[in-house]
Image (cartoon, grey):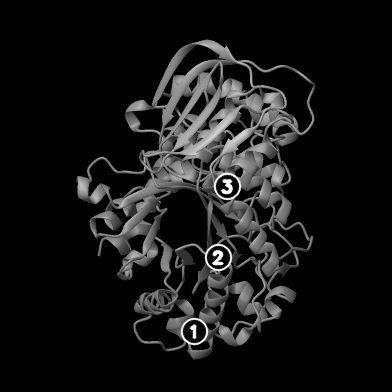
Amino acid sequence: MTVIPRPVSVTPLPGVCTPPSGGTITAEPSLDGVAAWLRGELPAGIGGVSLRVEARAPCSYALSIAPDGIDIAGGSPEAVFHGAQTLRQLLPPWTLRRSFPASSIELPAARIVDEPRFAWRGVMLDVARHFMPVPDVLRFIDLAAFHKLNVLHLHLTDDQGWRFEVPGWPRLTSVAAWRSSSMLGARVHEKQDGRPHGGFYTSDDLREIVAHAAARFITVVPEIDMPGHMQAAIAAYPRLGNGFAGGVRTGWGISKHVLNVGPEALDFCRAVLDHVCDLFPSTYVGIGGDECPTDEWAASGIAAPLEVQSRFTARMAEHLAARDRRVFGWDEIVGGGAPSGALVAAWRGVEPTRIAARAGHDVVACPDIAAYLDYRQSEDPGEPTPVGTLLTLADAYAFEPVPSDLTAIEASHVVGGQANIWTEHMESARRVDYMAFPRLCAIAEALWSPVADRDFADFSARLEPHLSRLDALGVNYRPLSGPRPWDARPDAPGYPRTLADRLAQLHEMTADLRR
């Protein structure tokens, strides 16, 4: 059966279906977009498919395969789209290619009824550390949609690069989008490649990304990290900082150079958020809020520097609310009292999910030890730049967004989860493929299926044929047997961590949430 999702109900029926050559895809008017997309994805001439919306749960679909044709009915166009993705997964892998041999197709008659567990099934893609060209982003969206993910959290800015244009601020693309070098491997080794890197998206680029995703029922949630992780912007406009006059950061890690949160810096942030709201229709807009050192604020004589960020977050939330948007921020924003209506991305282990949910905040769970796909996949020395704790395919499949000790009301605040793909050590789309797949397949199923329906042995058996689909889609996934010789990066050494060491560090890091 398909890898993602795991059907709630599969009822075998007698006979087979041979989709007719030259047949049609019929759909009611509300499904014209889904029908047009499906016509472009199925082999030319394959038809006999009916798409319709019917009275059922909005996210539920039923896929019926019978000798006389294929019927996909859903409670909404999005549900019908997910049913169509399941149909694509049931077809032979060669049908996923753009060129294939002429061959008849037979499908066993069956009925599949399915719906997702969580409303937020996401993946974060960091295009700040390493820029990803538009065609690669569009391809990544296609792969996310194939696995029925519905949120792309796009991390657009960081100390190492600013990745989109903002009217009135031209140096964000002429200066902040470029760095003179990139760190090779984990930062403890202090190696540099000496090669300039950069890139940025025009407003039209971002509109294309948003439209492409929307056609596949994926919401693009933009993130502009502030007031920390701003060295690139400050390099372009030093007056936004606290006296720093250097360049875009070339090393990984956290910069101490943050916004000065004065009137001009606040106006800059509002201008950026206004432009983002014009480009992205998402209800949520990410403002980061993570890892913001207060050293410069304290040195400049600002009273109560630890309280500065919470006031800053409140101001940005107020500004976004005026645009009918809600703040989306990393779990650090909870420490100073997150604004009402904020959505929290809980990344520092499991505890922040628990704390935020109990405080009444909606939460997207993305604990690093379970959902950070830059973390190493095995103990094999051939893994490229092995960093973080061990996160195997089995670990990814075991990801559970809802802590078991939450009450039903508290658990209702966990709206879903996401995988996070930080790209310090992923210099290309090919490297992103290797680190993401097949672990992203596992996390996608963990976010779709109820815990009681999940079984890793069963998933593993279904994953084997699914890899043929990834082959057909041209995905450079990590083989289940381990890394190949050419996957290694001996020039970019890593820094593995033990789970015990990381858990101890996370406990210390989240002390701000327990005050």
Q: Residue at x 56, y 39 (%)?
A: 27
Dot 1 surroundings within 10 Å: few (below 14), some, or many (20 or more)?
A: some
The quadrant where residue 9 appears: top left
* Residue type highlighted by circle 3: Arg
Q: Earlier in the sequence, mark 1 or mark 3?
A: 3
Q: Is residue 300 above or below residue 508?
A: below
Residue 225 lies, in percent from the top left, at: 52, 68
Q: Earlier in the sequence, mark 1 or mark 2?
A: 1
Q: CA distance from mark 2 to mark 3?
A: 15 Å
Name the front one of labels 1 and 3. Answer: 3
Q: CA distance from mark 1 to mark 2?
A: 21 Å
Q: Which mark is residue 280?
A: 2
In the picture of the structure, the residue carrying the numbered disc 3 is: 216
Q: Earlier in the sequence, mark 2 or mark 3?
A: 3
Residue 282 visible in the picture: yes
Q: Residue at x 34, y 78 (%)?
A: 307
Q: Which mark is residue 266?
A: 1
Residue 252 lies, in percent from the top left, at: 61, 60
